[in-house]
Image (cartoon, rainbow, N blue to C red):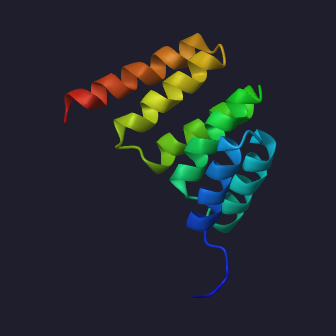
């Protein structure tokens, strides 16, 4: 068992830190994950939520959008983007993302 951190182990640490109430530190940990693996979808998803809670709306939306680019066929990624946009007060973007999610959900 080597002691090197993996994106998955860092992600788990970040979630624990977040649950402990330290959002800023959780964001730092997730940024370490993304430095190792830019396409780690779970980290983008989580950091979008954390940034939104910190009031960093542009960052939140950027990461939620990245998830839709990494998972273009997953309608859940658009649902999350819609929720993040809504919470950030970007109602038009939220409606667009929701419409996209619904149109994809129909095809399943």
Q: Position of residue 9 (x, y in %)?
A: 60, 66
Residue lying at the far bottom in this picture: please name it.
1
Q: Is residue 49 above or below residue 92?
A: below
Query: Is 61 displayed left or right of 101 in the figure?
Result: right
Question: Where residue 37 appears, x then y in whole percent?
Answer: 61, 65
Q: Please tell me whether residue 11 is drawn above or below residue 5 in the rendered image.
A: above
Find residue 36 and report its image quarter: bottom right
Pinpoint residue 72: horizontal percent, then vertical percent. 41, 44
Q: Residue at x 67, y 80 (%)?
A: 4
Residue at image point 56% right, 37% down: 65
Q: How many marks?
A: 0
User: Looking at the picture, how far across and down is residue 99, in whole percent?
Assistant: 38, 19
The quarter of the image holding the N terminus is bottom right
Figure check: 17 above or below 48: below
- Above or below, 73 against 78 in this view is below
Q: Quadrant of residue 50?
A: top right
Determine the residue positioned at 64% across, 31% down: 61
Most foreground residue, 16 or 44: 16
Pick the front one: 30 or 14:
14
**Quadrant that contains the C terminus:** top left
């Amino acid at each position: 068992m080597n002691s090197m951190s993996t994106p998955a182990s860092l992600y788990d640490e970040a979630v624990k830190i977040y649950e402990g109430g330290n959002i800023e530190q959780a964001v730092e940990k997730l940024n370490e994950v993304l430095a190792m693996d830019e396409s780690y979808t779970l980290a983008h998803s989580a950091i979008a939520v954390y940034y939104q809670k910190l009031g960093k709306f542009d960052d939140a939306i950027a990461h939620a959008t990245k998830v839709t680019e990494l998972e273009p066929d997953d309608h859940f990624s658009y649902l999350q983007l819609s929720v993040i946009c809504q919470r950030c007060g970007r109602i038009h973007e939220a409606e667009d993302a929701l419409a996209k999610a619904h149109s994809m959900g129909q095809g399943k």
